[in-house]
Amino acid sequence: MDDHLQKTDPDRQNGLDEETLFIVSQTFKALSDPTRIKILNLLFERERSVNGIAEALNIKQSTVSHQLRFLKNLRLVKYRREGTTLYYSHDDDHVINILKQTIDHASHQ
């Protein structure tokens, strides 16, 4: 990398271009919502349908669908179709590991 670029764009040398910053901030935004944390934690165990998630967490199906859409857009969850039912599972081991480590950390405070 040439010296001029390093001097004029210090964020770039650290890998923090605008796209990276946006993705990181959106990932932390996803993990800042208690409902999304519950959903991701549930999907860590095994894949589930929207109804299964709603029942397990005792929340409305529409709320689950909304949160899953947000998580899917960030590629944190994926789904597969079986007939008319969609089954969701986590899609990013890195983020799930961060979540699990944070939960473990908070549990031992």
Image: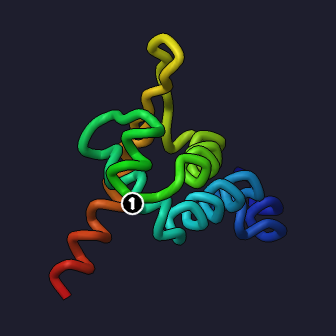
Tally of numbered tags: 1
Packing grade of label 1 (10 A; few <14, some 14-19, many >=20) is: some
- Residue in the image at 45% along x and 14% along y: 82
Q: Where does label 1 land, which residue?
A: 38
- Residue in the image at 47% along x and 38% along y: 50
Residue 29: image location, x then y, percent: 60, 66
- Image quadrant where one finds the C terminus: bottom left
**Displayed quadrant of residue 91:** top left
Tag 1's secondary structure? helix
User: Which residue is farthest top?
Assistant: 83
Residue 72: image location, x then y, percent: 59, 40
Q: Nearer the viewer, residue 83 or 99?
A: 83
Residue 105: image location, x then y, percent: 23, 76
Asked if residue 13 can be seen in this view, the reply is no
User: Which residue is farthest left?
Assistant: 108
Query: Is the residue 91 above or below the residue 25 in the image?
Result: above
Q: Is residue 70 found left or right of 76 in the rendered image?
A: right
**Displayed quadrant of residue 7:** bottom right
Query: Is the residue 82 above or below the residue 24 in the image?
Result: above
Three-letter code for the amino acid on which mark 1 is drawn: Lys
User: Which residue is farthest bottom?
Assistant: 109
